[in-house]
Image (cartoon, rainbow, N blue to C red):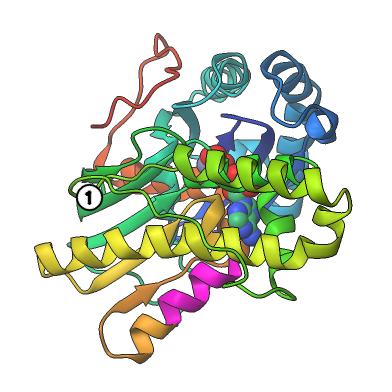
Amino acid sequence: MSAIILGIESSCDDTSAAVIQGQKILSNVIANQEVHKNYGGVVPELASRAHQQNIIPVIASALHKANISKNQLDAIAFTRGPGLLGSLLVGTSFAKTFAMGLDVPLIEVDHMQGHILAHFIKDEETDIVPEFPFLCLTVSGGHTQIVLVKDYFDMEIIGKTIDDAAGEAFDKAAKILGLPYPGGPLIDKYAKEGNPLAFKFTEPRIPELDYSFSGLKTAFLYLIRDKLKKNEHFIEENLNDLCASIQHTIVEVLMKKLKIAAKQTGITQVAIAGGVSANSEIRKRFVEMEEAGEWKVFIPKFQYTTDNAAMIAIAGYLKYLNGEFTDQKARPYARSINK
Ligand code: KG4
Ligand code: ZN
């Protein structure tokens, strides 16, 4: 029988717990925090408090859904970082205490590695997983990276954003349009009815494989500001086109560098991970690359795109196989240590 592991994720504003047996997810429970909606972004102190309220019911629910009792757990995996310290502390403290109480190993997982390793979940026998080496575009609210994945825990970041992350660009554009946080999914929704070429924005010129999104945000802000001076209904009248155009530009920027990375490395297995990988246009562009015979692509199931504990559980399982356990003294880290 394969090991049974509980994964806990609390790095930002989602409290999540998942149970995995081998590479198969038995449950993946996520509690979103509504409290941030009115603030246009995550408020760290409120996030930390909401995690404290959610963590026990979320873990109880994950165990119940998996039909697993706590005594059957072989290890506890948790997100050690990067993320908001107050949020990480809740999951970390709970994981340590639970592992100590059950006398099972504790396994730390890096959140960004978790996003990538979600590709190794095998819910069905037929699920195909990437082979090493492959490239992964990891795009979330806090990160935008092109990662050369040489092995499960041997990853090299070959490109990254020098300012805003792609998810942040979506969220900031949405905020300018008066949409609630997180705005990425709403931009995606309105973009479906809009013309992606209605508004043009200059794409950033950044050397090598790095990205920049802060200029795009400013260009978007100035466009809206100027247009609103002439027509106060400009946003309502053009919402779909505005969403389609900004989404198209962000996706175009992401794809361009990724294509260069694939050419430079000669790697044709390309994956996408992180919250922004839920975006319908980027998923479509990936499928097109496969249809054109350029890449073999790996697109995660929707439930494994935005923050979830299933990705922490699979990463925990892969470490469990190597006997890579964590000391009770481990403290969370806010910034990436896996360079
Ligand atoms: O990975 P994630 O859940 O959290 C972080 O680790 O940051 O990513 C959240 C980000 C947010 O910026 C959110 O707006 C974005 O992912 N996002 C999307 C979509 N769904 C989530 N962006 C564009 N289109 C989507 N469908
Ligand atoms: Zn994330």
For the residue pair 61 and 182, the one nearer the viewer reads as 182
In the rendered structure, which amino acid carries the disc numbered 1? Leu
Estimate the x, y position of residue 33 in percent, counting from the top left.
Answer: 78, 34
For the residue pair 37 and 58, the one nearer the viewer reads as 37
Q: Is residue 248 above or below residue 116?
A: below
**Mark 1 C-beta closer than 8 Å to ligand 1:** no
Estimate the x, y position of residue 149 in percent, counting from the top left.
Answer: 23, 54
Sort mark 1 into few (<14), some (14-19) or many (20+) by Cα contacts within 10 Å.
Answer: some
State left or right for residue 281 relative to residue 173.
left
Q: Quadrant of the C terminus?
A: top left
The residue at the far front in this view is 230
- Residue 284 magenta-drawn? yes
Quadrant in which residue 129 is drawn: bottom left
State left or right for residue 176 relative to residue 85.
right
Q: Which residue is mark 1?
A: 209
Estimate the x, y position of residue 9 in percent, counting from the top left.
Answer: 58, 35
Q: Quadrant of the N terminus?
A: bottom left
Query: In percent of the image, x 49 and y 35: which residue is there?
Result: 142
Quadrant in which residue 234 is drawn: bottom right
Q: Secondary structure at mark 1?
A: loop
State left or right for residue 24 relative to residue 296.
right
* Magenta span dominant secondary structure: helix
Estimate the x, y position of residue 271 in percent, counting from the top left.
Answer: 36, 65
For the residue pair 318 and 294, the one nearer the viewer reads as 294
Query: In percent of the image, x 67 and y 18: which residue is there?
Result: 44
State left or right for residue 160 relative to residue 24.
left
Q: Tell me the magenta residue range.
A: 279-287
For the residue pair 205 and 331, the one nearer the viewer reads as 205
Query: In percent of the image, x 17 and y 62: which residue is there?
Result: 133
